[in-house]
Amino acid sequence: MAHYVIGDVQGCYDELSLLCKKIRFNPNKDRLIFAGDLINRGPKSKEVLDFCLKYKHSIKSVLGNHDFYLLYLIEHKKKNKPLNNILNAKNINKIHKWLKNCPLVLRIKIKQTKETFWITHAGIPFIWSLDKARELSDEIKVVMKKDSYNVLENMWGDKPILWKDDLKGYKRYRTIINYLTRMRYLDKRGALKLRKKDLKQENNHIPWFKQTHPNLKDKENIIFGHWAALEGKTKLDNIIGLDTGCVWGNKLTAIRLEDKKLFQIKNK
Ligand SMILES: [Mn+2]
């Protein structure tokens, strides 16, 4: 049995199939964990979700910003051409239920190596402990169960940019979702700088993983996606980027957690 985490698929189903062949994915034994953004922009988003449902007993995913967008379209009965075949699908209720139940943060412990992996779409800001990130993820999961329509309605927007423990209501949910699904750069206070995507150095725009993570101890790792321009390069052994831009013509990447070995498939 092995655990594999796979970076942003974004509808690249053909490459996902090839990657599963390469790692010899056995749904009866292995576990796949997606780092979010399963869908959108690529050609076969529906097929990716059908694959997840087919093997749902062996597959987990954290939610990415594109996955939240799909949830918004579903619940608010909106259309968006590239995703309409999902929205009109016969199994849309099953897709909806599965996706809505995905967390924002997952923790996986590997027995053999005693390593722990914290998986989120964008990462975990240094202003939160790892446990706190998981508590906030649980908070979103709970509120999505009872009030998802309004959470999704109020999720849009970049503000507030700085986390405060006393944030309340939809502002609080929006801020948690922004940190865990859209973060790339933070300033020195830990405030979100959401508009910058490129890698040019700029004062007070620091990649979130470059600020010392006070709570990341020995044998603890963070895995994230979302930032294709990085091509997975964080220059850190314990903070691992998996978005290698398959949908932009680059590669789809998986990491085997038991030995941190990478597996990649080039975009066709
Ligand atoms: Mn993303």
Image: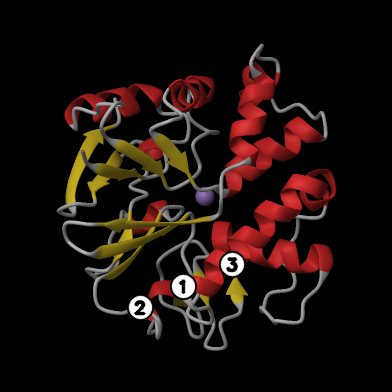
The residue at which mark 1 appears reads as 130
The residue at which mark 3 appears reads as 135
Closer to the camera, 158 or 140? Answer: 140
Closer to the camera, 20 or 58? Answer: 58
In the rendered image, which quarter is residue 174 located in? bottom right
Q: Which residue is drawn at 41% across and 28% down?
A: 12
Question: Residue 216 shows which numbered tag?
Answer: 2
Residue at mark 1: C-beta within 8 A of ligand 1:
no
Label 1 vs 3, first from the N-terminus: 1
C-alpha span from label 2 to label 1 = 8 Å
Q: Position of residue 98 (x, y in %)?
A: 59, 33
Say what amino acid the circle numbered 3 marks.
Glu
Say what amino acid the circle numbered 2 marks.
Leu
Disc 3 versus disc 2: nearer the observer: 3
Horizontal side of residue 150 vs 112, given as left or right:
right
**Regarding mark 2 in the picture, which secondary structure is present there?**
loop
Q: Residue at x 45, y 62 (%)?
A: 198
**Regarding mark 1 in the picture, which secondary structure is present there?**
helix
C-alpha span from label 1 to label 3 = 9 Å
Quadrant of image for the N terminus: top left
In the rendered image, the residue lying farthest to the top is: 90
Q: Which residue is drawn at 41% across and 35% down?
A: 59
Label 2 vs 1, first from the N-terminus: 1
